[in-house]
Image (cartoon, rainbow, N blue to C red):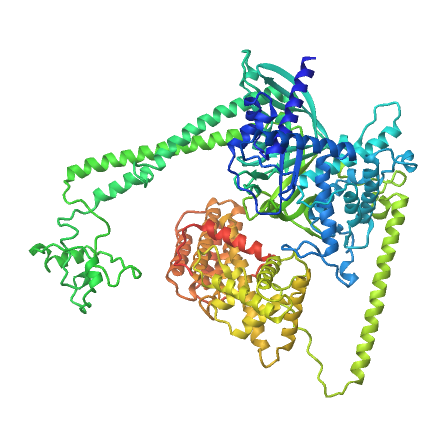
Amino acid sequence: ETVSQNHGCIKHQQTLLNQLREVTGTTDIQLLQQALQVSNGDLGEAVTFLTEKNAKVPLQDETTYYQTSQVASDRYISVGSQADTNVIDLTGDDKDDLQRAIALSLEESNRAFRETGITDEEQAISRVLEASIAENKASLKRTHTEVWSDSPNPHDRKRIDNCPVGLKNVGNTCWFSAVIQSLFNLLEFQRLVLNYSPPARVHDLPRNQKEYRNLPFMQELRNLFSLMVGSKRKYVDPSRAVAILKDAFKSSESQQQDVSEFTHKLLDWLEDAFQMKAEEDREGEKPKNPMVELFYGRFLAVGVLEGKKFENTEMFGQYPLQVNGFKDLHECLEAAMIEGEIESLHSAENSARSGQEHWFTELPPVLTFELSRFEFNQALGRPEKIHNKLEFPSMLYMDRYMDRNREITRIKREEIRRLKEHLTVLQQRLERYLSYGSGPKRFPLADVLQYAMEFASSKPVCTSPVEDIDSSAPPGGTTGQQLPPPSTAEQDSLPPLESSGPASGPTTAPAAAQQQRVPIHKPFTQSRLPPDLPMHPAPRHITEEELRVLEGCLHRWRSEVENDTRDLQGSITRIHRTIELMYSDKSMMQVPYRLHAVLVHEGQANAGHYWAYIYDPHQRCWMKYNDISVTKSSWEELVRDSFGGYRNASAYCLMYINDKKPFLIEEEFDKETGQILSGMDKLPADLKQYVKEDNELFDKEIEEWDIMQARKAQQEKLALATAPMSIESSPPDNTDPEYMEQPSPTNDSKHLQEDTERAISRAAAEEEERSPEALLSAIKLEYARLLRFAQEDTSPENDYRLQHIIVYFIQNQAPKKILERTLLTQFADRNLAFDERCKSIMNVARAKLDLIKPEEVNMDEYEMWHQDYRNFRETTIFMMTGLELFQKTNYVEALMYLIYSYQYNKELLSKGLYRGHDEELLGHYRRECLLKLNEQAAAMFESGEEPDVSTGLSIMNELVVPCIPLLLVHDAERDLLAVEDMRNRWCSYLGQEMESNLQEKLTDFLPKLLDCSTEIKSFHDPPKLPTYSTLELCERFSLIMAALGRVPTKGR
């Protein structure tokens, strides 16, 4: 009874929190609880407390506003309009307004539910659905292209083999596609939906609002799923299912939809539909709802409320997790499982503190986490997206959160807490060694001692650094050409020189020259060469005894500091490792959940695009479901788009499945034949007929298209036969270069299409949309943007030439006609035809291309420039791959990439400085790779073991020796030294005692190594290159260049 009362108190408190949040828009749970505590549960006083705390919140400029937030497992959407007469100003001091706002909120909520049986939550969802349908019908203009237009050629829309079927975006419904695809690819869920049959009694007359809403939707969802199983189309249209959702509610407002909210309600509707069926099938027994069994679990809330302990069990569906302040999923879960101050949970004292722990007692087969990446900014009055990086594993072990492991988890959490405290102390101590000093600039203490040692050990000088400068002599003390006198500004900027005595006269010049001082010349900060200066300052006077004592102390201190630093770093590493392995024993790895789907959002809180990554266990790869496009992907791409912290894309929902329940993703078997059911065989009879009819319509469309095309071809043939023979046949259309082609917006050049669309959008604001001037304006804007990139001085890792061909052309001074035609080709891309504005620009660009006469643009020259750029990209991939393999110490594979990248790059640089990459950098890593391989091979030979000896000599004969002529051919000093080092290593074995078979192999090998010929006798074929999108290429190039650190290069 006590537990039940406590549970009731918690539920009442949750209701007050929800109402308070809805009235004030505050989403901070701690602030809401504080307001209730201060007001002793009085809602009016709590609102006063919150609004006084945020009294100066600026009003929004938009005509509509909204806020989405989440508390525990409940989610709410508050929608309103500033023009609405019911909007009440809560920023003033009038308490009547506060009371009226509370009463109005409760009255509206209750009245709506009484009249329609629909909650505010459901009405908000209806608004976005209705807005999506209306927008699709009106073909409204969009700032971000999300609606795919159907190709008139049905062959372009034909499904290839058994590729997964995509979903057409019917108007800002990419969120629908992402959620539905994730659920559809849960084969157990798919079977439940396909085999669902409505209760027999509802065929007469549905009894309530839920039956009116859910049953038609279930039928449309079955139809949609059946098309996704057996359709001949590449993608299908979900408009009817979305329309059913819209028609289930009545609202005239439009609003951006929170996708997690949609998923939550979708499962609720499915649960209701299956509950009706379960109650009919199991009359007299407690019905089992398959949706509940699939998606819902239970946790035990163990806590203390005002000093009194309580325990109660609660159900959960999608489990909400906060992202802000956490680096990975386990940190989020740890924080979500503990609320408030929980010290009193584990003590016998009767504390007044309140808090609770959550322990899972039953996990669902499908475990879904909502990542809260949206928060309401009170100061700005609008929601904002959290872009923080959050890592999550492909395999998640939930043992540490299970109630049965409560005690051992508490012990481990306490141990981790103790280790982290110790870690903090060690890190603070290490920081004192690594950032030593009391001023704003701090340095490693070991370096400070080393610098002091270097200063003390320098040769003493007897004069001031000012006194040894002869202002009348040329720099360096020589009698060369007299420099012009400094300007007045220079004279003013120079420090006044003291009068030179005899010691600073010409007699000191020979002594200064003997010190071999190196001049430091700064061409951008001084107009003449500086005088010779010492390498660094030195003491005026120091005795040998002083130097001996000082060096001894500094050496000893530096050694002590280095040892202390190493010990601290070692201890920190061990503690990190201990924490990482805390839950790695087998007893805590018994509840494995494998990542099934990741739903990704790209954009900001009020706009963006959604897609899903879903694992295909049969192909053992990740698939990317992006509206109509379904493509193979990789874990690396998923990580890049889902972890966050990069661009504006990040995961907002993670779907894990119990790895010990394979039925979730296993195909169904035929009970009679034992064969796997696939395609149409999976469907019930009514759905087979439905899909068959749709496929027949599609076949008919293809047939009609083919007849029409054949008729057109015949007409063209007749027209050609009757035309005068003097008319020359027009040349075939020039196909775009591969890096300019865009068969779909998801391929390698999606960024190019987006850049073009941005230029078109900006130009449309200045010119009439369909006029040729709009195209000219768009091209000018795009060219100006690319020109800025071409002229920008960037670091080696940010090479804009890889981002766009025009940047490469500008830097290499390509002819104007080549630039113009390339830009026209970009704007003539057929994938721009997604709205009328882009389509009109595309048509104008295509017309312009057709009007260009052959004599105006030399197509051979045009193709030559594009081929040069293809070669540049190919060289970049060789270089990047070679450097990546080198960083991974895979020198055998790295060598060929580095060799070919150097050779191809040299060919590019022969045409111009900016045609290729830094030759010195590539030469350095080519050389280093050969030296590393030589070292490995020599170590294998020294081992004397037969397999190792053979492998080592094979590396030398097949890889190193064939490359030596490449190092000798240009007589570069460093390359020649590297060859000498390699030869000396092997020649050092001569005269050493070794077994006769080793001596024989060495004698046979050395002549090949010592051959001074620069003729390349035999060589490997270039390795095959993977294809990269421009985005992937730029990212990987940037990462590897940043990872190289200091390299012997002067920059491009």
Q: Is residue 505 left or right of residue 637?
A: left
Relative to residue 79, is residue 695 depicted above or below? below
Image point (43%, 57%), residue name? 924
From this viewpoint, is residue 1019 visible? no
Image quadrant where residue 847 sits:
bottom right
Q: Position of residue 899 (x, y in %)?
A: 50, 60
Q: Relative to residue 925, is residue 131 drawn left or right?
A: right
Asked whether 884 or 128 is in front, the reply is: 128
Which residue is farthest left? Answer: 502
Front residue (pair 334, 453):
334
Q: Locate residue 19, reporting x and y percent.
A: 64, 29
Q: Using the rendered view, name the quadrant where residue 217 is placed.
A: top right
Q: On the picture, is 496 further left or further right than 929?
A: left
Relative image position of residue 690 (x, y in whole percent):
87, 49
| Residue at 71% across, 52% down | 135
Instruction: Determine the residue positioned at 39% across, 31% down.
Output: 428
Q: Is residue 441 left or right of residue 161?
A: left
Quadrant into which the N terminus falls: top right
Q: Nearer the viewer, residue 469 or 451?
A: 469
